[in-house]
Amino acid sequence: MSTYGFFAAAGAVTAIAWLRRHHRAMGLTENEFWAALWLIVAGAVVGAKALFIALGWHHYASGELRFWADFGTGFVFFGGLLGAALAGGMFAWRRRLSFWRGADYFGVALPLGHAMGRVGCYSQGCCAGRASHPVQLYESVGLLVIAFIAHRVLRSVNAGKFSRGAAFCAYGFFYGALRLALDPLRADGRPERWLGLSPQQGIAIALMLAASAGVWWLGRDRPTTAARVTVASTHSAPSRSP
């Protein structure tokens, strides 16, 4: 096994093991967990490949790449994230489960596993940065920080301080910010620019906006802390009626 394969596998195993440990907290039985996981993995592969083709269609139009012959070449993480989210949403809808309850745990597991995978990228030389910038290692460290932040938010969610989905949205926002900051340092970035931004930076901004909107949407009907305290005090106060 190559060094890249080792770190990629280690990242996947670490993320899956962490998720399985918390599958009951996600509201899933053992069978539901594995069924959801395989569907999400399939959605991630399809989404990652679809976005690569959409961004690099000229490689296929020119015959430089062929879909089936070169299927193992070229995947875009943002597409994989979208595909995984859609697959997870479909599974939750079909099984009448809470999507956001499970998504919060993926918000911790994804950056944790991804951080290890980026070390593999560094060893392989892919996703490289410009001279003197090991951008893969920068991203790996950033992902570990994001995993820590998402875990802290998840604890607050479980304590009732934040709405379900806040941890996943935190992951999405901070990962978008990380990619937005690191993309100019990458040596393999696409030359196309729109308003001075690469496609990856544009997607990163869209992810940050979507995550921000998600936090607002999920918390819009949630009473403020002061209101909850007032309501709790009202219900707990003894009756003074004669």
Image (cartoon, rainbow, N blue to C red):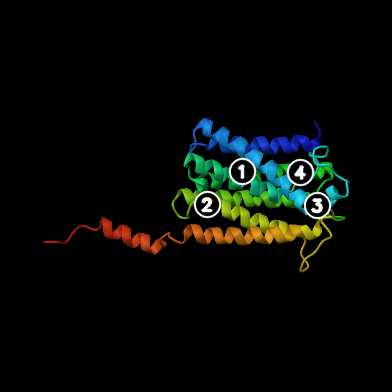
Circle 3 Cα neighbour tier, 10 Å, few/some/many (<14 / 14–19 / ≥20): some
Instruction: Give the image quarter of residue 7.
Output: top right
Residue 111 is left or right of residue 120, and the answer is: left
CA gap, disc 2 and disc 4: 28 Å
Mark 1 lies on residue: 109
Measure how far apart labels 2 and 1 are at the Cα level: 14 Å
- Amino acid type, mark 1: Ala
State how far apart marks 4 and 1 are (Cα): 16 Å
- Nearest to the eye among marks 3 and 1: give it: 3
Mark 3 to mark 2 CA distance (whole Å)? 32 Å
Mark 3 and mark 1: Cα distance apart in space? 29 Å
Q: How many marks?
A: 4
Q: Secondary structure at mark 4?
A: helix
Q: Secondary structure at mark 3?
A: loop
Residue 119: numbered disc: 4
Quadrant of the rendered structure where residue 161 is?
bottom left
Sooner in the amino-acid sequence: mark 2 or mark 1:
1
Instruction: Decide if residue 81 is on the left or right side of residue 156.
Output: right
- The disc label shown at residue 56, or none: 3
